[in-house]
Image (cartoon, rainbow, N blue to C red):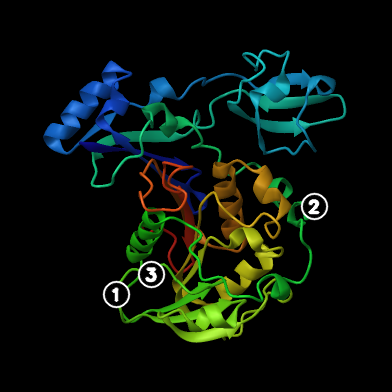
Amino acid sequence: MTLEAELTWSAGRGIDGVLHRERLILADRALLADGRWMRAAEAARATGAVELDPAPWITPRGLAPVELAAGGVRLGGAAIPGRFYPRLAFAGSSLAQGPRDLRPVRLLDCHDDHVRVDPNHPLAAAATRLVICRSDLEPAPGRRMVELFDGPGLQALPADPAATFFRLDGFQRKDEGADRCFYAEPRFIQHLDARCRAQIGSLYGRFLQPGQRVLDLMASWDSHLPEIPADLHVAGLGLNQAELEANPRLHEVVVKDLNLRADLPWGDAQFDAVLCTAALEYLVRPRAVLAEVRRVLRPGGLCLLSFSDRWFPPKAIRMWSQLHAFERLGYTLALLKDAGFVGLNSETLRGMKRPEDDKYAAERDGADPLFAAWGRTAAIAAAVV
């Protein structure tokens, strides 16, 4: 039987709070390593779902910040407060248990002669809930339950998101040439595997309602929309005319380079939802673009940004490759908050098996992971899930 381990947690309170949901698909045998997991799996098989205290696997916790001499820190680049770094970067200190310790810790402060680090697990301060339940999704081989706690928490917003994520050097790219040239030839290929794409469609389907006006931002020939509702009015803005014209879900087509001009060619409050799939990493002025997204959304409108762990390196912003996959969610949430969206949520899905007919199946047995973050315009302040 396939099981799903679901970890939900929150950060912040009230209108500034963020709700998070982490999902990991597992085979039965993945829970054999711990008797507590085994008993939970047996209960889930019998009843459908069971709750388990996640605290034993969220450690260390309750430790005071550690202050270290700056000269002994090896971060491999600029020290940026608010970012997470592997413990091995602090070799020789009490933080690192050996030269290969990759467990992340957050850098709190950085000065000429010392740094201050939070040594706790990224989820240590969060209110967490763990549920084991049955799943219809096929698990990838070799996944382990402990992977559920590897990464979550890194998307929690730092004390100063702007200083952490919105540094100008982070938006440089390897290829600074005109995007219209890079994307001049159509690419009728799928960048994500079929299972990941299906889950993106399922996620979008949870929010979309019949008759809504939807903007597919940075669109191509596939909008990853669910079949139902079928009567959506979808506008697509992208860089390649042929790709957009080949997209069967689009009713409007706009060819525009948002890295040249961030303004959107629609009036205020024109859309119920704006979706952006596997493209946020290419924006060099994302704050300006999301300000425009908020402008064109109706009251209570949804902005949903999704991505995986694959992209075109030459055109992705420098920071994207430097961030941990879960930190990219933190960056995405920081953008949404900066643009004035509320009711912020994030969701991740890992551990699905890659389709056997996928061209990368021999290299990667797991399906592409799904990362998503969303918020709404201020007409509603509560999260809508």
Of residues 305 and 184, which is closer to you in this image?
184
Q: Is residue 289 visible?
A: yes
What's under tag 1, amino acid-wise? Pro
Verify CB contact (< 8 Å) between mark 3 and mark 2. no
Of labels 3 and 2, earlier in sequence is 2
Q: Is residue 161 visible?
A: no
Of labels 1 and 2, earlier in sequence is 2
Name the residue rendered at 47%, 81% in the picture. Answer: 246
* Left-right relation of 322 to 47: right
The crowding category of the residue bearing disc 1, from other C-alpha atoms within 10 Å (few below 14, some 14 to 19, many at least 20), is few
Cα–Cα span, label 1 and label 2: 42 Å
* Mark 1, secondary structure of its residue: loop
Name the residue rendered at 56%, 78% in the picture. Answer: 237
Cα–Cα span, label 3 and label 1: 9 Å
Q: Which residue is mark 1?
A: 229
Name the residue rendered at 56%, 70% in the picture. Answer: 187
* Left-right relation of 259 to 363: right
Number of the label disc, if any, that sits on residue 225? 3
Disc 3 versus disc 1: nearer the observer: 3
Position of residue 72 measured from the top left corner of the image (x, y, whole percent): 81, 19
For the C terminus, the image quarter is bottom left
Position of residue 296 measured from the top left corner of the image (x, y, whole percent): 54, 78
Q: Which residue is mark 2?
A: 169
Of residues 1 and 261, which is closer to you in this image?
1
What's under tag 3, amino acid-wise? Leu
Disc 3 versus disc 2: nearer the observer: 3
* Quadrant of res 132: top left
Number of the label disc, if any, that sits on residue 155? none
Position of residue 158 measured from the top left corner of the image (x, y, whole percent): 63, 42
